[in-house]
Amino acid sequence: MAPPKPPRNDPSHNPARWAARCAPGLIQGLANWLCYSARTTTDKILAIVLPIAAFSAAGFEHSIANMYLLTFALLTKFWAATMFWGLIGKIPSAFPHLTVFGALMNLVWVTIGNMIGCVVVGITYWFSYLRKPESGSPRG
């Protein structure tokens, strides 16, 4: 008997979600390569400003940022004082989608997507700079 197919609305099979998971890795890889190509500290700082701004403006998820944000959200949901919930006018059960399992699954998928994006950038640059050694060079 064949295993059941996942529902079509399953987020792990949504191409747009995969693009959103890989794009941060692409931007991070681009920022790394721009930084490595710079010569001075000022050049390095200026080189990473636009990729960081694009990353933030697009609202992408990054595995390292999510480690903090999801942990903070879970700690708030489970251990925040009653006064806090009264001040914001909500109750913890208003956030049923925020679970430990959901946070772990988010970290798994976002980390995989970030790694794919970085690998794509690395491979692109590797092929861009792939050259035959010159006959007079030490490698030739």
Image: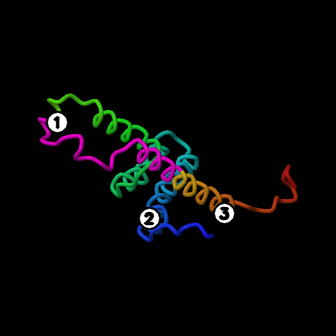
Kind of residue at badge 3: Ser
Q: Give the crowd class for mark 2: few <14, some 14-19, many >=20 residues within 10 Å.
A: few
Instruction: Identify the mark at residue 128; answer none if there is no mark.
Output: 3
Q: Earlier in the sequence, mark 3 or mark 1?
A: 1
Kind of residue at badge 1: Trp
Drawn side of residue 96 relative to residue 85, left or right: right
- The residue sitting at the front extreme is 1
Contact between labelled residues 3 and 2, with CB atoms less than 8 Å apart: no
Is residue 59 magenta-colored? Answer: no
Q: Kindly identify the residue that appears in the image at 52 percent across and 53 percent down.
A: 114
Q: Which residues are magenta?
A: 85-111
Q: Which residue in the structure is indicated by mark 2? A: 10
**Image quadrant in which the C terminus is located:** bottom right
Q: Give the structural element (helix, strand or loop) at label 2.
A: loop
- For the residue pair 126 and 62, the one nearer the viewer reads as 62
**Image quadrant in which the N terminus is located:** bottom right
Q: Kindly identify the residue that appears in the image at 56 percent across and 44 percent down.
A: 39
Residue 27 against residue 90 in the figure, above or below: below
Kind of residue at badge 2: Asp
- For the residue pair 123 and 71, the one nearer the viewer reads as 71
Pinpoint residue 60: horizontal percent, then vertical percent: 39, 54
Drawn side of residue 77 relative to residue 138, left or right: left
Residue 80 against residue 22 in the figure, above or below: above
Drawn side of residue 71 relative to residue 84, left or right: right
Q: Earlier in the sequence, mark 2 or mark 3?
A: 2
- For the residue pair 37 and 2, the one nearer the viewer reads as 2
Residue 20 against residue 49 in the figure, above or below: below
Observer-side mark, 3 or 1, equals 1
Q: Kindly identify the residue that appears in the image at 14 percent across and 39 percent down.
A: 88
Q: Give the crowd class for mark 1: few <14, some 14-19, many >=20 residues within 10 Å.
A: some
Q: Give the crowd class for mark 3: few <14, some 14-19, many >=20 residues within 10 Å.
A: few
Observer-side mark, 2 or 3, equals 2
